[in-house]
Image (cartoon, rainbow, N blue to C red):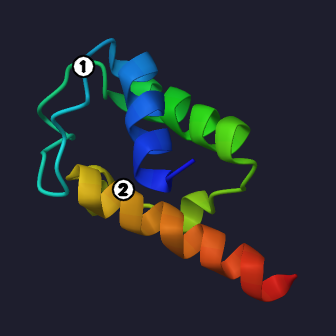
Amino acid sequence: MNLEIQLKTILKNVLNQNTNHFTLQSPLLGEYAELDSMGIMSLLMQIESDLKIDINAINLTAETFETFGSLLQNIQFSLSHIDSAA
């Protein structure tokens, strides 16, 4: 399954929102009340579980969650490091 579609599905479950209309520029942080500190932790745990990756929390900033595209880019970066380590 396409990573973009997988992330939209994860966000749909965490946000309880339709995410089909999300573009790379769609805002996340500050746009959805569900993305408070606990919501972000829930989102990260869901991403790690569904995509079978470990996201390094040290490298996460507010900018990571600013838009759908910035979150997708961070996940792609994490996945590329898994692939290169294998």
Residue 86 versus residue 17 in the image, above or below: below
5 versus 57 height, above or below: above
Left or right side of 6 for 16: left
Quadrant of the rendering where the C terminus is positioned? bottom right
x, y (%) of residue 65? Answer: 30, 50
* Residue 66 in sight in this render: yes
Spatial separation of the CA atoms under disc 2 and disc 1: 17 Å
Which disc number belongs to residue 18? 1
Which one is in front in this view, the residue at disc 2 or the one at disc 1? 1
Judge by depth and name the residue closer to the eye, 55 or 85. 85
Q: Position of residue 9 (x, y in %)?
A: 44, 30
User: What's the amino acid at mark 1?
Assistant: Asn
Residue in the picture at 56% in, 65% down:
58
Dot 1 crowding, Cα within 10 Å, few <14, some 14–19, many 20+: few
Q: Which residue is mark 2?
A: 71
Q: Quadrant of residue 62?
A: bottom left
